[in-house]
Image (spheres, rainbow, N blue to C red):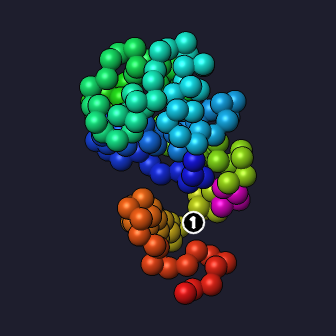
């Protein structure tokens, strides 16, 4: 599970939404999952739903775009989100915005994001905030590209902060 908070993209697929929830709103009481078996077991324990690791795998990989209502209900219950989050963009986009703020608050509480950074952002002029916005969006796009390359077995092009370049 990564300690980064991405916004749920408008019109995100079900697989993208499930991945976002696992990355950003995994319940602290469940302990971080290492694989689909642990993910399914945590959801089943917490909700009583009969959910298999195969179902979790299908949801995460986009091989199951139309799950049963009981599966969506179990996910919504486990992650503490409205079931509408899994619906059509007209309904799910505003919910995704609210969940992004919830994930940010949680990261502040866990010390992943310093509160003074958010306060400083609020205090910036609109022009300076626009520059910071563009920097954050560019960094997020680069991070996604790096992650996708790592997922396919490619080495990152640049060293991580604090590491020596090859």
Q: What element carries label 1?
A: loop
Q: Splitting the image into 4 quarters, where does residue 47 fall?
A: top right
Q: Residue at x 57, y 86 (%)?
A: 165
Q: Residue at x 67, y 78 (%)?
A: 162
Residue 148 location in percent, x, y? 39, 61
Residue 25 location in percent, x, y? 56, 37
Q: Which residue is drawn at 50% across and 43% down?
A: 100
Q: Is residue 45 visible?
A: yes
Residue 132 location in percent, x, y? 50, 69
Position of residue 9 in the picture relative to residue 1 (left or right): left
Q: Is residue 133 visible?
A: no
The residue where tag 1 is placed is: 124
What secondary structure is the magenta-colored segment mainly? Answer: helix
- Residue 27 belongs to magenta span: no
Single out the residue that lies furthest toward the bottom: 166
Where are the magenta residues, as a range?
A: 113-117
- Asked if residue 43 is positioned above or below residue 18 in the image, the reply reads above
Q: Quadrant of the C terminus?
A: bottom right
Give neighbour class at mark 1: few <14, some 14-19, many 20+ (Cα, 10 Å): few
Position of residue 69 in the picture relative to residue 30 (left or right): left
Residue 21 location in percent, x, y? 49, 38
Position of residue 114 in the picture relative to residue 77 (left or right): right
Q: Nearer the viewer, residue 83 or 115?
A: 83
Q: Splitting the image into 4 quarters, where does residue 114 fall?
A: bottom right
- Asked if residue 50 is positioned above or below residue 20 in the image, the reply reads above
The number of callouts visible is: 1
Q: Residue at x 57, y 33 (%)?
A: 38
- Residue 114 belongs to magenta span: yes
């Amino acid at each position: 599970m990564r300690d980064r908070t991405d916004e749920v993209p408008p019109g995100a697929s079900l697989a993208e939404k499930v991945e976002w929830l696992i990355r950003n709103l995994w319940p602290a009481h469940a302990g971080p999952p290492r694989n689909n078996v642990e993910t399914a077991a945590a959801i089943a324990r917490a909700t009583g739903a009969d959910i298999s690791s195969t179902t979790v795998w299908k949801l995460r990989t986009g091989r199951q775009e139309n799950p049963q209502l009981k599966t969506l209900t179990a996910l919504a219950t486990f992650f503490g989100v409205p079931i509408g989050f899994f619906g059509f963009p007209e309904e799910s986009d505003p919910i995704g915005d609210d969940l992004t703020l919830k994930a940010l608050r949680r990261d502040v509480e866990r010390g992943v994001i310093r509160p003074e950074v958010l306060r400083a952002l609020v205090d910036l002029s609109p022009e300076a905030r626009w520059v910071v916005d563009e920097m954050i969006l560019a960094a997020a796009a680069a991070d996604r590209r790096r992650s996708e390359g790592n997922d396919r077995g490619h080495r990152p092009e640049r060293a991580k902060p604090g590491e020596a370049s090859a």
